[in-house]
Image: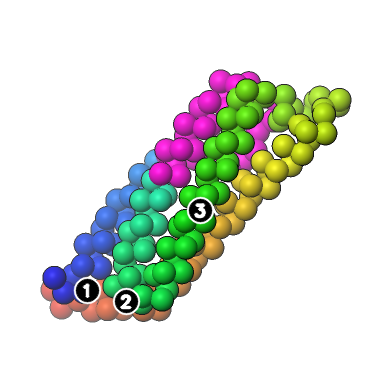
Amino acid sequence: MEQIEKVIELSKELSRIGLEVNKINFNYKIETNKDSKFWKTKLENFQNYSEKCISYYNVCYSILKLFNSEESQIFLFKISKYRQMTTKIEKFIEEIIKNPAIMSSKDMQQSKWSKESKMNFTESFQNCLTHEKDMNSKFNEFYEKNIKFQIEGKINKQD
């Protein structure tokens, strides 16, 4: 299969997975004063979201690999880092499920451990969101600069 045809096929898969990610409707907003049921749902939602994102990023990697081995290896490293970050967040949420008071903004007598846990959780969420934005930005930049015009040319020739 020609390189551009493969990219077109992978781009369609990327679009399909992207729609699935959007349907999950996950957000990184930190909630306070919620019960363990809320956090169980948040954990399930996050796990579903992060798995779909991994699938999405794996397709991005496959596209990058067709054009630039070095860039694809860097992106693969970023996928691995994303997986580590999501695993850490899942552990934080599991801790919150056991003790939802960690996220309480009304508890003035929170322990030092609770305050640190809340701060670490918030920081991990923010870092993961920033990492995702960076990955998306890097891929989109590469795609726009190196791939898009070739695909458009191929599609225009088919019309």
Q: Which quadrant would the C terminus be assigned to in this image?
A: bottom left
Residue at mark 3 to residue at mark 2: CA–CA distance: 22 Å
Taking the magenta stretch, the answer to whether it contains residue 47 is: yes
Quarter of the image where the N terminus is located: bottom left
> Could you tell me which residue is drawn at 61 percent across and 46 percent down?
125
User: How far across and how far down the image is residue 111, in percent?
Assistant: 82, 29
Instruction: Give the labeled residue for mark 1.
Output: 4
Q: Is residue 12 above or below residue 45?
A: below
Q: Quadrant of residue 14?
A: bottom left
Where residue 28 appears, as percent x and y from the top left, is 58, 43
Does residue 113 sit above or below 13 in this rendering? above
Identify the residue under disc 2. 67
Q: Please state if 30 lies on the left or on the right of 71 as rendered.
A: right
Residue 30 percent across, percent down from the top left: 65, 38
Residue drawn at x 68%, y 47% as measured from the top left: 123
Q: Secondary structure at mark 1?
A: helix
**Crowding at label 1, few (<14), some or many (≥20) Cα neighbours within 10 Å?**
many
Residue 144 shows in the view: no
Q: Does the segment drawn in magenta span residue 55?
A: no
Residue at the disc numbered 3: 82
Please give left or right for residue 35 compared with residue 104 in the image. Answer: left
Mark-to-mark CA distance, 1 and 3:
28 Å
Specify the amino acid type for callout 3: Tyr
> Which residue is at the far right?
109
Predominant SS of the magenta segment:
helix
Please state which of residues 45 and 22 is positioned toward the viewer in this rendering. 45
Q: Helix, strand, or loop for circle 3?
A: helix
Q: Earlier in the sequence, mark 2 or mark 1?
A: 1
Point out the stretch of residues depicted in magenta: 24-51
What amino acid does circle 1 point to? Ile
